[in-house]
Image (cartoon, rainbow, N blue to C red):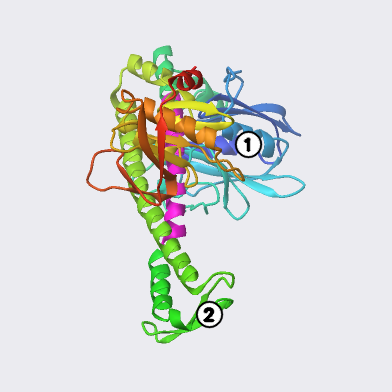
Amino acid sequence: MSLNWKELELILSELPLEGSYIQKITEHSVSSFTFSLFSRTEKAFLFYVEVSTPYARVCRTDRIRKKDKRMQRFTQYMNAHIVGRKIERVWQYPYDRAFVMDLRSSKNVLRMHIRLYSGPGANIIITDSENTILELLYRRPGRHEEKGEKLFIEERTSEGERKFSVRDYDTETFNEFIDKTSSIESSSERRKELEEKLKEKRDKELAILQDRLSRQERRIKETEGFEETKRIADLLSGAIWSVKKGMKCVELDDWEKNEKLSISLDPALSPNENLEKYYQRYRKDKRASEMAKEEAEEIRKEIAATEEKYSALLEGASPEKLRKETEKPADSRKDDAKKPGVWVSVKGFDIIIGRNAKENDEILRHYTRGSDIWLHTRDYAGGYVIIKAQKGKSVPLPVLLDAASLAIHYSKAKKSGKADLYYTEVKYLRRAKDVKTGLVLPTQERNLSVTLDEKRVKEILG
């Protein structure tokens, strides 16, 4: 049973936290920690913190709990930025199961907000003195609880209709009672540990998905002005007769906005080249925006499905089912074992080959950038081949020919031993709508006729 706000108030009142120094932080699980503190009056003592479980609590403890073999990101942050600080002030949210410790060093004051809530509100959050989030145990994008966000603190004016009281206790202090009675039967304890591991796995997967979504949302923001770029290009097109080579800008009448519009130009380009440059930027940003919106929608669906999956497991799965789920590797796209397709290296260039429509689609969505080279056989079904671009380097012809042989090898052109291919940069691919998975339409493509070199393919594939 977790603490209510009155019990938390009593717990804090019994502790010599203010004026104590944090000497060490030990992680026991993803949501439980022991703070080794030193007080001038009571010397060394241990302060236990557990959140996001049915037994969420803080209390003074004499128990030496087992240290977790792994150390999560949040614990590493606390060890780097919290250990050594003095607890200057401790204050509780009014009528609430949450409190704050102001932690002072010679440089600044940080705040540690400890929330003993049930549900997604449970957390340990480190902020600066202005309540800007620096780090936190659980990232909660839906609650705007992420690094860099301003922490919202709801201060209650009363405890509401439900009245709380402190449980009867027969120990010298309430801290001692909570530490003693919170021990539960081993089977329940085991389930709790499994649930915590599953939540850790869930949060890892959601953090990866949220990071991917944030990248796509940034891309949408960066390219949202493509319609304005086209409007400028259209204005320039209508007055191209007034543009001369060598001009750095031209002022035109913007009839739509009833004002003068200054359009920047590249003096080294001809008027038509400047015009085409604007239209190219428009087409590029439009394609990028459409693909980013499509990808963002797919990721949102993945996030919803992931949350639903773990919610169902945590609510009703048997301990055996929980164990099996925690032992499965996290669904991380950075895990090499999860990478789709065939990955090889040719003369220092990484090449990815998709073997079916699903792999083709996943590779394009998650493992390519705009400057990567895409190859595919003409008139034959087959896998997409991607040559990963390298900054400042062009793809040598031998690498391009090897990639072409791989494309033929993984296509229906393999039997004929030769094929025509086309290739272009990934940024010039347009995703087709309402067609089968993975289908894209290339633009600005180049042609290549290649005879399959089976011996070379075998060498590359090992």
Name the residue that disc number 2 marks: 244
Of mark 2 and mark 1, the one earlier in the sequence is 1
Query: For the point 44% across and 34% down, which residue is it?
Result: 203
Name the residue that disc number 1 marks: 77
Q: Which of 212 and 249 is in front in this view?
A: 249
Q: How much space separates mark 2 and mark 1, taking CA atoms?
A: 59 Å
Q: Which of 292 and 384 is in front in this view?
A: 384
The location of residue 88, given as percent across then percent down, is: 69, 45
Circle 1 Cα neighbour tier, 10 Å, few/some/many (<14 / 14–19 / ≥20): some
The location of residue 130, given as percent across then percent down, is: 60, 55
Q: Which of 193 and 50 is in front in this view?
A: 193
The location of residue 163, given as percent across then percent down, is: 37, 43
Above or below: residue 267 compared with residue 137: below
Looking at the rendered image, the disc whose residue lies closer to the viewer, 2 or 1, is: 2
Q: Which amino acid does label 1 sit on?
A: Tyr
Query: For the point 36% across and 42% down, which residue is it?
Result: 299
Res. 105 image quadrant: top right
* Disc ID at residue 318: none
Q: Nearer the viewer, residue 43 or 283?
A: 283
Q: In which quarter of the image is the N terminus?
A: top left
Q: Is mark 1 on a helix, strand or loop?
A: helix
